[in-house]
């Protein structure tokens, strides 16, 4: 992943609502979620939701597909893997294997 790609991803995630949307989609991965469900669960007005989902989609973090009258959104796992790899690539003086496994998520860390 190039620096410019990573910058676009971090910019997309740099908004509270978009980060909450992305984290919600991560929790259900690899399953897709309809825009209506996302709007209800996160209490986001439909017009605002559409704008935020489009930003996440342009960054490459999520994808959409139409199913009947619904649009379903899901995480692009390959992009998530790339951005995580980008972050840890230089960890521990270029030896990311020394970083170990990620810490468990705290039970209070809910969005």
Image (cartoon, grey):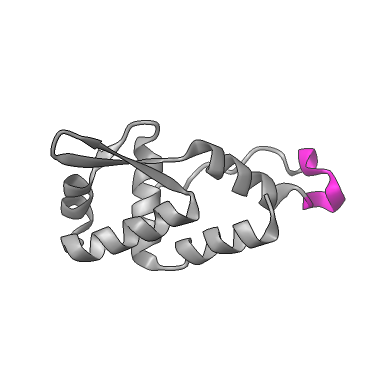
Quadrant holding the C terminus: bottom left
Residue beneath the point at 82% across and 50% down = 92
Q: Between 27 and 15, which is closer to the camera in this rendering? A: 15
Quarter of image, res 5? bottom right
In front here: 100 or 50?
50
What is the x, y in percent for residue 57? 41, 52
- Check if residue 93 falls in the magenta segment: yes
Q: Tell whether position 78 is magenta.
A: no
Q: Position of residue 83 (x, y in %)?
A: 61, 49
Q: What stretch of residues is rendered in magenta? A: 90-98
Location of residue 58 in the rendering, given as x and y in whole percent from the top left corner: 44, 56
Which residue is rendered at x = 18% and y = 45% of the image?
37
* 102 relative to 28 in the view: left or right: right
80 to the left or right of 55: right
Q: Is residue 66 left or right of residue 28?
A: left
Question: Quick check: 93 above or below 98?
Answer: below
Q: Residue furthest right?
A: 93
Above or below: residue 46 compared with residue 15: above
The residue depicted at 67 percent of the width and 52 percent of the height is 87
Q: Is residue 111 visible?
A: no
Dividing the picture into quarters, in which one does residue 19 lie?
bottom left
């Amino acid at each position: 992943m190039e620096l410019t790609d990573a910058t676009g991803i971090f910019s997309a995630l740099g908004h509270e609502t978009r980060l909450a949307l992305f984290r919600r989609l991560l929790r259900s991965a690899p399953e897709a979620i309809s825009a209506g469900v996302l709007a209800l669960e996160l209490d986001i007005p439909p017009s605002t939701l559409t704008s935020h989902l489009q930003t996440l989609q342009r960054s490459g973090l999520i994808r959409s597909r139409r199913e009947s009258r619904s649009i379903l959104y899901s995480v692009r796992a390959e992009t998530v893997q790339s951005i995580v790899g980008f972050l840890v690539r230089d960890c521990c003086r270029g030896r990311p294997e020394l970083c170990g496994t990620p810490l468990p998520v705290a039970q209070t860390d809910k969005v």
